[in-house]
């Protein structure tokens, strides 16, 4: 509630023109009323009443003039400004916007709004931020939160409260007044520096995290990964993490930069049916996920995941190979060999490295989400042959889902059976890898699945080592999305001999 009593009530007239009808909302610093226009019958406005310290009235007038000069479809027009000196009250008259706040909208969905709305919402906020931040005298909003966003019946965003917006002044080291909503405000809004465009981008990150966790979190703290909704687009996570960096110089530096990253990653995620991964944009700058799923025991999923990881490590940088199974043993055995650990004695660290690939053994989904916010260019998930809900979900959401199965005539039904059991899910991104399969088996499976991304994998005894024939297949699989920056070879099996 507004701390000071209002000067307005039903029937009060402001500026000899606007008659108060009812209260729309109130906060600690202001109250907003709905008013009818006496000069334009039938026209309604929102009138915001605030109490200003007489000592800063000049600043208030300047800010009001700045707000009146703004013109953007996602901002309410501010058409008038009045002062009432005896009480220190000031009034802004602005567009009355039909709709509900994002806060109320989220309550209607118990916090979980449809996931397909989140990125369009973010782009709308960024659109108005880009307008505000690129003005000759940049305007910093400083109070982005669900209660300050109005959703129209057409599901368009409008920012509705400019009570603490300010013009950026390059000569200042920090803000004179520290304002903003706890949980959504950037760290520098608490006195560590002057707010600028990057402060608003932090608030956007807080808002996105709030939407992605069903309203539970707006700050990236320990354990938040477990509350991020599983069906959300993966590429949002590293973007949110970067927006929420504590130091402004570590965040995105402009709304335009975030818009570009969201669009590039969204385009990458939504590759058209029938196109191979080679058609995806090579400009994608986020973390990409390869999920390797075996259709049956002994199909070679782990061997293939290792080979793919080291292929990617030779071509690019920062690759993680994740064993997404809490009871799997393969990586533990490998770690014993690499680190010289006695057999059966587990290492205290679940991460170890082999020739530039970071191996993560017995990893949970929450750990994967945390890794997505890091600096890895590729994360390869070894899902084994299990099809529990968690691993199947990760497979379906991956950028490159790889199914590994036998090309033998008597085992091909394993692959077609998996495809049929998941036919309700889009399968245009799937890639089928058949170790040691003859060309005839590949042709038959392509025809049966009506799918052209079926690859025969050659004999490859050492998955850590480069093999020309294997590289040719993987070059085709990943054609166009990575650049070739050769790295030294790791002769794992030969070293052990």
Image (cartoon, grey):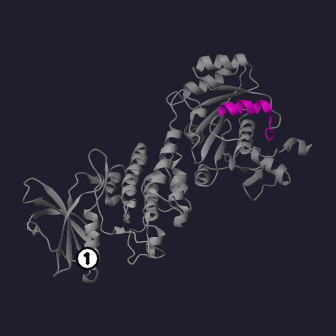
- Which of 305 and 486 lies nearest the eye of the viewer? 486
Residue 478 falls left or right of residue 268: right
Q: Is residue 53 above or below residue 14?
A: below
Q: Position of residue 16 (x, y in %)?
A: 8, 68
Q: Quadrant of residue 53?
A: bottom left
Kind of element beneath mark 1: loop
Q: Quadrant of residue 347?
A: bottom right
Q: Position of residue 328 (x, y in %)?
A: 71, 44
Viewer can see residue 409 = no
User: At 71% from the left edge and 22% from the top edge, which residue is drawn?
Assistant: 407
Q: Main secondary structure of the magenta part?
A: helix
Viewer can see residue 319 = yes
User: At 83% from the left edge and 45% from the top edge, which residue is drawn?
Assistant: 490
* Magenta-drawn segment: 463-477
In the image, residue 90 lies in the stretch drawn in magenta: no
Q: Position of residue 348 (x, y in %)?
A: 75, 59
User: At 62% from the left edge and 20% from the top edge, which residue is drawn?
Assistant: 446
- Residue under pointer 1: 3
Placement of the C terminus among the 4 image quadrants: top right
């Amino acid at each position: 509630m507004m701390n000071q009593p209002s000067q307005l009530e039903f029937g009060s007239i402001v500026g000899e023109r606007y008659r108060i009808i009812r209260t729309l909302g109130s906060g600690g610093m202001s109250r907003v009323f709905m008013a009818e226009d006496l000069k334009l019958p039938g026209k309604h406005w929102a009138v915001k009443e605030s109490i200003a310290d007489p000592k800063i009235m000049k600043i208030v007038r300047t800010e009001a003039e700045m707000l009146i000069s703004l013109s953007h479809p996602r901002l309410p027009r501010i058409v008038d400004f009045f002062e009432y000196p005896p009480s220190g009250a000031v009034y802004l008259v602005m567009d009355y916007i039909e709709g509900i706040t994002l806060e109320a909208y989220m309550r209607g969905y118990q916090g979980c709004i449809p996931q397909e709305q989140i990125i369009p919402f973010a782009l709308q906020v960024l659109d108005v931020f880009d307008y505000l931040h690129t003005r000759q005298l940049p305007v910093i909003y400083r109070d982005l939160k669900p209660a300050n966003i109005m959703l129209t019946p057409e599901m368009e965003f409008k920012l509705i409260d400019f009570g603490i917006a300010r013009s950026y002044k390059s000569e200042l080291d920090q803000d004179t007044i520290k304002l903003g909503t706890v949980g959504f405000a950037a760290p520098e809004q608490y006195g560590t520096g002057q707010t600028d465009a990057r402060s608003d981008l932090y608030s956007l990150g807080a808002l996105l995290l709030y939407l992605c966790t069903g309203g539970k979190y707006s700050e990236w703290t320990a354990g938040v990964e477990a509350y991020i909704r599983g069906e959300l687009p993966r590429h949002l996570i590293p973007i949110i993490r970067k927006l929420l960096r504590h130091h402004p110089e570590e965040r995105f530096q402009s709304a335009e930069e975030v818009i570009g990253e969201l669009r590039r990653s969204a385009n990458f995620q939504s590759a058209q049916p029938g196109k191979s991964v080679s058609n995806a944009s090579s400009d994608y700058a986020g973390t990409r996920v390869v999920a390797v799923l075996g259709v049956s025991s002994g199909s070679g999923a782990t061997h293939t995941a290792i080979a793919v990881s080291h292929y990617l490590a030779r071509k690019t940088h920062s690759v993680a190979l994740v064993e997404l199974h809490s009871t799997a043993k393969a990586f533990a055995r490998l770690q014993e060999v690499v680190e010289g650990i006695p057999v059966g004695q587990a290492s205290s660290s679940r991460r170890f490295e082999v020739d530039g690939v970071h191996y993560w053994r017995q990893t949970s989904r929450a750990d994967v989400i945390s890794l997505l916010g890091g600096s890895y260019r590729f994360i390869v998930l070894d899902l084994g042959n299990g099809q529990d809900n968690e691993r199947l979900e990760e497979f379906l959401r991956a950028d490159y889902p790889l199914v590994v199965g036998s090309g033998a005539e008597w085992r091909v039904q394993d692959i077609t059976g998996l495809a049929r059991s998941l036919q309700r899910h889009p399968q245009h991104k799937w890639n089928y890898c058949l170790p040691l399969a003859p060309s005839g088996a590949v042709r038959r499976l392509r025809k049966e699945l009506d799918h052209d991304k079926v690859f025969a994998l050659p004999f490859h005894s050492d998955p850590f080592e480069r093999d020309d024939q294997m590289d040719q297949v993987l070059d085709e699989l990943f054609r166009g999305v990575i650049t070739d920056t050769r790295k030294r070879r790791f002769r794992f099996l030969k070293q052990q001999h």
